Amino acid sequence: MANHDPNFDGLFPETPEEKKAEFFGALTWYLEARNWAHDKMRSCPTGSPGFDVRMYHSLYFVYLVGAVDCVGGYLQGQAQENFSKRIWEAVRPERKGGYVRVLRNAIVHQGFNLTTAGHAEGTTLREYCPKAVKDRTGTYERPFKYLGELAEHCDGIVNPAIRHVLHDLDFFNPEPEGINVDKLQAFIRQADCPDFVKELAPKIIAENYPIWAPQMKATAIKNMRRLLGEG
């Protein structure tokens, strides 16, 4: 059994509200990274260094699957199973999305280079999907010719599915959650800052939270909707 370290007391999510906030923050990160990589894929110019081309395309699929797994991990029981099944069967119905997941696993665990072939279209590079990927479960043939086409297809399935989950779980409710002053004080006690800041900060934040919280919540919701293709 791991030793208890009191220095970390109060720093990890324990309440449903804290776990909800942690999940929303993690999902935001996965989607930010996925969308950044996708934008780089779309505009990847001819003459780009091979490292950059490989990085953009690899990160897209890593963070796409990461976002799906993040949502699946937050859900419970049958809802978790239904969500994952809905996603991967839509991506590749006859093989339950195996191509994308096996491609991602090969990138992460085997250092697979998915950008070994492509061609220039005007001033932009278009990379071919590897013709097939395989693991212990079988061989999966590419569902599209180009990785960009596959990415567009995946976003068109994943974005609405995640929006649906977030809506059903009330994540788009603009009403902010309450503040846990004890948790806040515990966090600030661990911070590397002067003692007078540790003394004043909890009081200042607690007094201003009713003003800040609705603005922060609205901004977070707006950003999530943007990441999921709304607006």
Image (spheres, helix red, strand yellow):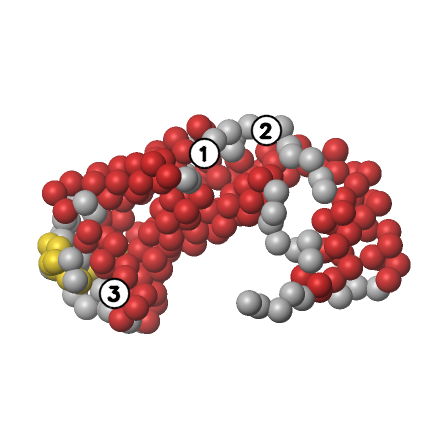
**Residue tagged 1:** 166
> In this image, 77 relative to 23: left or right?
left
Kind of residue at badge 3: Ala
- Where residue 182 appears, as percent x and y from the top left, is 76, 47
- Label located before the other in sequence (1 or 2): 1
Quadrant hosting residue 215: top right
Farthest residue toward the front?
A: 1
Q: Residues within 10 Å of mark 1 (few under 14, many from 20)?
A: some
| Residue in the picture at 74% in, 49% down | 184
Q: Residues within 10 Å of mark 3 (few under 14, many from 20)?
A: some
- Label located before the other in sequence (3 or 1): 3
Quadrant hosting residue 206: top right
- Residue 106 image label: 3
- Where residue 213 appears, as percent x and y from the top left, is 68, 36
Q: Residues within 10 Å of mark 2 (few under 14, many from 20)?
A: some
- Where residue 230 appears, as percent x and y from the top left, is 42, 33
Kind of residue at badge 1: Leu
Distance, label 1 to label 2, CA atoms, is 13 Å
> In this image, 13 relative to 46: left or right?
right
Observer-nearest residue: 67 or 152?
67
Q: Is residue 126 above or below residue 163?
A: below
Q: Are marks 3 and 1 in contact (CB under 8 Å)?
A: no
Q: Are marks 1 and 2 in contact (CB under 8 Å)?
A: no
- Label located before the other in sequence (2 or 3): 3
**Residue tagged 2:** 174
Q: Please, what secondary structure does the residue beneath circle 3 have?
A: helix
- Where residue 125 appears, as percent x and y from the top left, is 24, 59
Kind of residue at badge 2: Pro
Q: Please, what secondary structure does the residue beneath circle 2 have?
A: loop
